[in-house]
Image (spheres, rainbow, N blue to C red):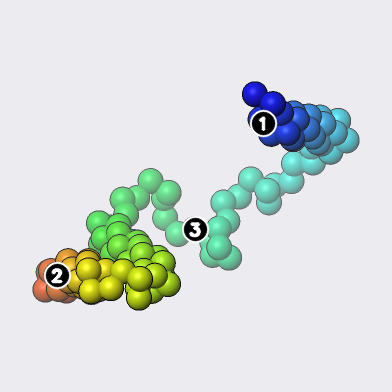
Amino acid sequence: MADYLPIFVHLTFVAALVVLLLTLHTLLGGSHPLPGKSEPYESGVWPIGSARERVPIRYYLIAMLFLLFDIEAIFMYPWAVVARTLGVFGLVEMLTFIGVLGIGFLYAWRRRALEWQ
């Protein structure tokens, strides 16, 4: 229990600081609503149409493919650091991993999932 005492003290200070800052903001900040603050605006582009429109499934598919290859890159960095100590077994495992991802990439390519319309 004594090992966790610094963590609890730090957590207590953080919680107290959050409460203090939020209280000061509420007391001193005030509210100044302007007509422009309530208008929707995102990424420097005024919205076109309703926010309730359905997003095409291709958007999510491209996002998932991006995450897939991003995860591949994340796994390759630690593997590259210890590649020599893993030897042939590590090489075969990484080639298997890249092969499975490559098959998924070829499948997505043949299904024309990468074409944005």
- Distance, label 2 to label 1, CA atoms, is 49 Å
> Which amino acid does the dot numbered 2 rest on?
Ile
Q: Residue 3 bears which disc, if any?
A: 1
> Which amino acid does the dot numbered 1 rest on?
Asp
Name the residue nearer the viewer: 66 or 6: 6
Quadrant of the rendered structure where residue 114 is?
A: bottom left
Element class at badge 1: helix
Residue pictured at 43% horizontal, 49% vertical: 51
Name the residue nearer the viewer: 66 or 86: 86
Give percent across and percent down for residue 99.
Answer: 17, 71
Q: Is residue 26 visible?
A: no
Q: Residues within 10 Å of mark 3 (few under 14, many from 20)?
A: few
Mark in the foreground, 3 or 1: 1
Query: Relative to 10, does residue 89 appear above or below in the rendering?
Result: below
Q: Are marks 3 and 1 in contact (CB under 8 Å)?
A: no
Q: Are marks 2 and 1 in contact (CB under 8 Å)?
A: no
> Which amino acid does the dot numbered 3 rest on?
Pro
Q: Which residue is mark 2?
A: 103
Give percent across and percent down for residue 76.
Answer: 36, 70
Query: In this image, 63 relative to 98: left or right?
Result: right
Query: In this image, 15 relative to 100: left or right?
Result: right
- Distance, label 2 to label 3, CA atoms, is 38 Å
Residue pictured at 45% horizontal, 59% vertical: 48
Give percent across and percent down for residue 62.
Answer: 29, 65
Q: Which residue is mark 3?
A: 47
Q: Earlier in the sequence, mark 2 or mark 3?
A: 3
Give percent across and percent down for residue 28.
Answer: 88, 35
